[in-house]
Image: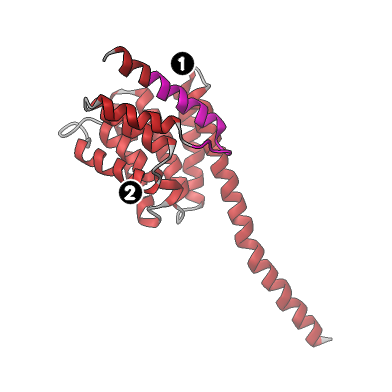
């Protein structure tokens, strides 16, 4: 009986050891999906007048996930994406603080797992370096933006996001033919089954930018 009890105890311990990490992974995945869907909803469905408060609330949720999983890169990346998007909508000196925090989170995530989320670290860093003013006001750098966007494309050459931000970067730099090539490649990106709202919103942004380029040619 003692041997049987011991074997049962060992078996139960092994099962729990296997199930615990799986349960934590499921919980993290659910939290990440909530952040992604929340970001897409605020970015593409919430009226501009309500976005500031909505992004702030979403940033608090992301911060809590980062605190719960400090050794995982994904929550840091999502918090950075939310902050950087909010900064773009907010503007002003407050936006610069958000952008700095987003950059720092991405650099922390890079140390944990540079390849996470199909190059999203470098896509977001590239957009930040491109959009933020340079020294002495901010940390913006066209050279760094170019390097980060190239890294993103190396990791995800056919993705909608890296090609869109590459196209936007090239457009801002005056290279319209290359910008249109990148944007059309972004439009041809395979749809992401788990991100239909984000894909639809991004495609609208791409089409709008293509229209802008065509109308100013």
Q: Quadrant of residue 30?
A: top right
Residue 151, position as x, y percentages in the image: 31, 46
What's the residue at 30%, 35% (across, down)? 128
What's the residue at 69%, 72% (across, down)? 13
* In the rendered image, the vertical position of residue 74 relative to residue 188, given as above or below: below
Residue 34, position as x, y percentages in the image: 57, 38
Q: Is 155 in the magenta?
A: no
| Residue annotated with mark 2 | 107
- Residue range (magenta): 190-209
- Which is in the foreground here, disc 2 or disc 1? 2
| Kind of element beneath mark 2 | helix
Q: Which mark is residue 49?
A: 1
* In the rendered image, the vertical position of residue 164 relative to residue 123, given as above or below: above
Residue 131 visible to an observer of this rendering: no
Identify the main secondary structure in magenta.
helix
Question: Would you say 63 lies left or right of 146 here?
Answer: right
Q: Quadrant of the N terminus?
A: bottom right
Q: CA distance from mark 2 to mark 1?
A: 31 Å
Closer to the camera in the image, 208 or 5: 208
């Amino acid at each position: 009986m003692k041997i049987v009890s011991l074997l049962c105890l060992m078996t139960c311990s092994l099962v729990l050891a296997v199930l615990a990490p799986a349960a934590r992974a499921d919980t993290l995945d659910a939290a990440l999906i909530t952040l992604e869907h929340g970001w897409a909803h605020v970015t593409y469905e919430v009226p501009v007048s309500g976005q500031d408060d909505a992004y702030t609330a979403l940033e608090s949720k992301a911060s809590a996930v980062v605190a719960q999983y400090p050794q995982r890169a994904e929550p840091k990346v999502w918090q950075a994406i939310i902050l950087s998007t909010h900064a773009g909508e907010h503007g002003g000196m407050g936006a610069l603080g958000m952008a700095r925090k987003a950059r720092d989170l991405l650099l922390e995530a890079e140390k944990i797992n540079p390849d996470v989320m199909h190059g999203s670290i470098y896509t977001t860093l590239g957009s930040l370096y491109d959009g933020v003013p340079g020294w002495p006001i901010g940390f913006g750098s066209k050279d760094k933006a170019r390097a980060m966007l190239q890294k993103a494309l190396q990791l995800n050459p056919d993705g909608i996001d890296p090609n869109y931000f590459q196209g936007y970067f090239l457009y801002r730099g005056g290279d319209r033919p290359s910008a249109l090539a990148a944007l059309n490649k972004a439009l041809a990106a395979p749809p992401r089954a788990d991100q239909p709202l984000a894909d639809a919103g991004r495609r609208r942004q791409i089409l709008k930018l293509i229209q802008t380029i065509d109308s100013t040619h």
